[in-house]
């Protein structure tokens, strides 16, 4: 499975070739600090790892006003890895930035796969709600109960958002 940083790097390279600094600029332009934590070193390490794996193709370009840069483009293997990574991140109902990353690159999935990935996420979230409800029924400590209620409220909010996103995809002819 692709890591979160791999999904981000591959998703940004779908837009067109770029060097590492250019990818960091694309991230900043998207206010990525609000939906994902990505370190500069992680981007460069991920570029090297993905190139070795054949998911990217890199070529050296002489720098005009600065150092030479390695420009990367995504390969068909990279596109496949991206699609699998987005779907896998969506299927994980844990409350971290994985879903935000997946939603940011949902447009890279074919329409039917995007719809299926959203359905899988909805099912996973509904299962999580049921687990939280079971835990609430047996929780003794007030702090645990408050934490579980918070988690349930977040799950319910995302389920409502998913319903809207699903209707939006359906309206865009993605059935």
Image: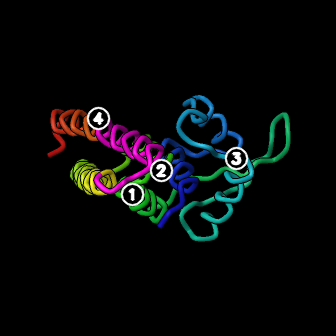
Estimate how packed mark 3 is, as few (under 14), some (14 to 19) or many (20 or more) residues with alpha carbons within 10 Å.
few
For the residue carrying disc 2, how many other residues have a C-alpha within 10 Å: few (<14), some (14-19), or many (20+)?
A: many
> How far separated are the C-alphas under marks 1 and 4?
16 Å
Marks 1 and 4, the one that precedes in the sequence: 1
Q: Position of residue 136 (x, y in %)?
A: 32, 51
SS under mark 4 = helix
Tell me the distance, in whole angstroms, between the alpha carbons under discs 4 and 2.
16 Å
Q: Which residue is mark 2?
A: 98
Indicate which disc, 4 or 2, sits on the residue closer to the N terminus. 2
> Picture coordinates of residue 47 (x, y %)?
65, 57
Question: Circle 3 — which element?
Answer: loop
Who comes first in sequence, dot 1 or dot 3? 3
Q: In the rendered structure, are the residues bearing label 2 and label 1 in contact, judged by CB atoms less than 8 Å apart?
A: yes
Colour logic: rainbow
The residue identified by callout 1 is 92
Residue 149, image x and y in percent? 36, 41
Residue 157 among magenta residues? yes
**Residue matched to label 3:** 39
Please give the range of residues in magenta.
Answer: 137-158
Q: Nearer the viewer, residue 161 or 153?
A: 153
At horizontal 37% and vertical 39% (from top left) the residue drawn is 154
For label 1, the crowd category at 10 Å Cα-Cα, with few meaning under 14, some 14 to 19 and many 20 or more, is some
Query: Does label 2 or label 1 sit earlier along the sequence?
Result: 1
User: Relative to the observer, which residue lies in front, 163 or 148?
Assistant: 148
Magenta highlight on residue 31: no
Q: Are marks 1 and 4 in contact (CB under 8 Å)?
A: no
> Disc 4 marks which residue?
161
Is disc 2 placed on a helix, strand or loop? helix
């Amino acid at each position: 499975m692709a890591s979160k940083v791999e999904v981000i790097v591959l998703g940004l390279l779908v837009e067109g070739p770029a060097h590492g600094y250019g990818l960091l600029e694309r991230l900043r332009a998207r206010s990525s600090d609000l939906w994902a934590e990505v370190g500069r070193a992680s981007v460069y390490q991920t570029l090297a790892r993905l190139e070795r794996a054949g998911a990217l193709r890199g070529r050296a370009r002489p720098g005009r006003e600065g150092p030479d840069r390695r420009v990367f483009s995504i390969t068909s293997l990279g596109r496949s890895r991206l699609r699998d990574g987005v779907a896998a991140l969506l299927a994980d109902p844990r409350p971290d930035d994985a879903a935000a990353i997946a939603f940011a690159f949902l447009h890279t999935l074919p329409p039917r796969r995007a719809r299926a990935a959203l359905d899988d996420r909805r099912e996973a979230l509904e299962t999580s709600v049921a687990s939280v409800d079971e835990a609430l029924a047996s929780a003794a400590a007030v702090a645990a109960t408050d934490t579980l209620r918070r988690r349930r409220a977040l799950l319910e909010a995302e389920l409502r958002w998913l319903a809207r996103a699903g209707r939006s995809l359906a309206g865009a002819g993605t059935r």
